[in-house]
Image (cartoon, rainbow, N blue to C red):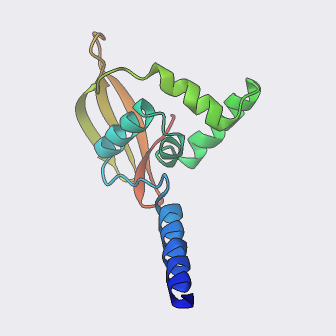
Amino acid sequence: MKMRQITALLVTTLLTIALAACKGEKKASTPTEAFKLFYEAMKNKDVAAIKSLISKETLASMEAEAKSKDKSLDDYLAEESKSVPPSMPQLGEEKIDGDKATVQFKLDNAPNWSAFSFVKEDGGWKINRR
């Protein structure tokens, strides 16, 4: 009986550690992949994943912006995710220059292309405000 309890405790502990290690940690190997992961995270209102795909500098800036509106960063990001377009934007050219990059995108109803800026940070590409 004790062996069964010890095994159950061990399995539960290992699963908890594995889930905590994986929670919200999405690393994109390319800026285009980061854009796609960010879009999906926004669409799913997955605040932990959204935060994992934004650079530290940009998160700090967003946190200050949220604070100025008397909101937490999580509430601010959840609110921002409500404005995500229903379908993935059309993706265009990806330009990489060292640890910085841009990805062109176009919304379905937009006449012009726009760009997201990225920075390589902690082993993956992340959204970065200019």
The structure residue drawn at horizontal position 31% and vertical position 11%, both measured from the top left corner, is 110
The structure residue drawn at horizontal position 48% and vertical position 51%, both measured from the top left corner, is 24
Q: Percent x, y for residue 81?
A: 49, 27
The structure residue drawn at horizontal position 35% and vertical position 52%, both measured from the top left corner, is 28
Q: Nearer the viewer, residue 130 or 88?
A: 88
* Vertical position of residue 16 compared to residue 31: above or below: below
Q: Percent x, y for residue 2?
A: 57, 89
User: Residue 75: which quarter of the image?
Assistant: top right
Q: Nearer the viewer, residue 101 or 2?
A: 2
* Vertical position of residue 24 compared to residue 106: above or below: below
Q: Nearer the viewer, residue 55 or 13?
A: 13
Which quadrant of the rendered structure holds the N terminus? bottom right
Q: Percent x, y for residue 94?
A: 26, 39
Relative side of 67 to 127, left or right: right
Q: Total number of numbered labels?
A: 0
* Vertical position of residue 15 compared to residue 2: above or below: above
Farthest-out residue, front: 1
